Image: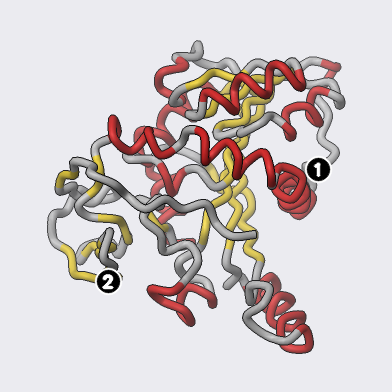
Amino acid sequence: MKTFSTVPGKERSRDVACNLCLSNHYKTLLRSADFLFVKCSSCGLIYQNPQPFFADLKERYTTDYFKYEFNNEENFFGLMKLGLKDIGMDQLKPENGRGCFLDIGCATGKLMEDMRGRGWQVQGVDLCRKSAEYGWKKRKVRIFAGTLEQAAFQSGSFNIIHSSHLIEHVPDPRAFIREIKRILLPGGQAIITTPNISGFQARLFRKKWRSAIGDHLTLFSVSTLKRLLREEGFKVLKIRTWGGLAAGTAPLIIKKPADYLAKKFGFGDVMLFLVEK
């Protein structure tokens, strides 16, 4: 699957400090005609700078984004299930038949539908209004159309919070993680999946890496995401990575062992963190 990406139009932008350590010192890492990724000289976080204003950024996630999510929902669902299986949560059921599950960036609500079928009370959040409307009409799942902060859930509302390929799109990842912690119950768990810039593919392809795109505002490594989560008070339970070489970039005889080694030794293209409040 091709990663969803837009070509920025006439968007306003601003310089930003490192979201991890607040430093304003950086060096250029990846440059294109439409965006610039820099590396923080203090902590090593890689982020886009300057960044578009959120009011302009959110306009990217409308009709074209909905079509992309709709056309790929079965593939995305399969990948999410594989990730959950890796951490032993693909068949997770709520204790005593009661539990609340939140999917942030839930798109059309396919995973929510599956979790509801296993006894969870489900809630979703997605910036795309068309996706939220489709999820309700097609699956009768509740999806708030907007950001997690705008949803303003009560503190301690959820047992499990899931977020797949979203944190890299968020203008303020620290505030995002902080809000996840606030709305989790004590002992609740969060699952966060995002591209891994410390993985083999990122190192091999550099500016041609499929996740080095203008829609990704922050590109985390295993170490920078671990630092952020720990600084916000989470206990890291499991880290998994997968994806050695993307389909079509190498013959199957090379791709299969590359995928196996990437998963075994933790340098995969995508990483998943399971954390606990």
Location of the C terminus by quadrant is top right
Looking at numbered disc 1 in the image, what kind of residue is underneath it? Asp
Q: Residues under labels 1 and 2: Cα distance?
A: 37 Å
Q: Position of residue 109 (x, y in %)?
A: 69, 29
* Residue 222: mark: none
Is tag 1's residue or tag 2's residue first in the polypeptide sequence? Answer: 2
Residue occupying image coordinates x 65% and y 69%: 243
Q: Is residue 54 above or below residue 98?
A: below
Look at the image and tell me whether residue 186 can be seen.
no
| Residue in front for this viewpoint, 238 or 255 | 255
Q: Position of residue 114 (x, y in %)?
A: 81, 31
Location of the N terminus by quadrant is bottom right
Say few, some or many: other residues with alpha carbon within 10 Å of mark 1 (under 14 / 14 to 19 / 20 or more): some
Q: Is residue 46 above or below residue 29?
A: above
Q: Is residue 60 above or below residue 152?
A: below
Left or right relative to 220: residue 200: right
Q: In this view, does 134 lie above or below 28?
A: above
Say few, some or many: other residues with alpha carbon within 10 Å of mark 2 (under 14 / 14 to 19 / 20 or more): some
Left or right relative to 204: residue 75: right
Residue at image mark 1? 90
Mark 2 element type: strand
Look at the image and tell me whether residue 45 can be seen.
yes
Mark 1 element type: loop
Asked whether disc 1 touches disc 2, contact meaning CB atoms under 8 Å apart, the reply is no
| Residue in front for this viewpoint, 30 or 174 | 30
Residue at image mark 2? 29
Q: Position of residue 249 (x, y in %)?
A: 62, 80
| Residue in front for this viewpoint, 190 or 61 | 61
Residue occupying image coordinates x 69% and y 47%: 72
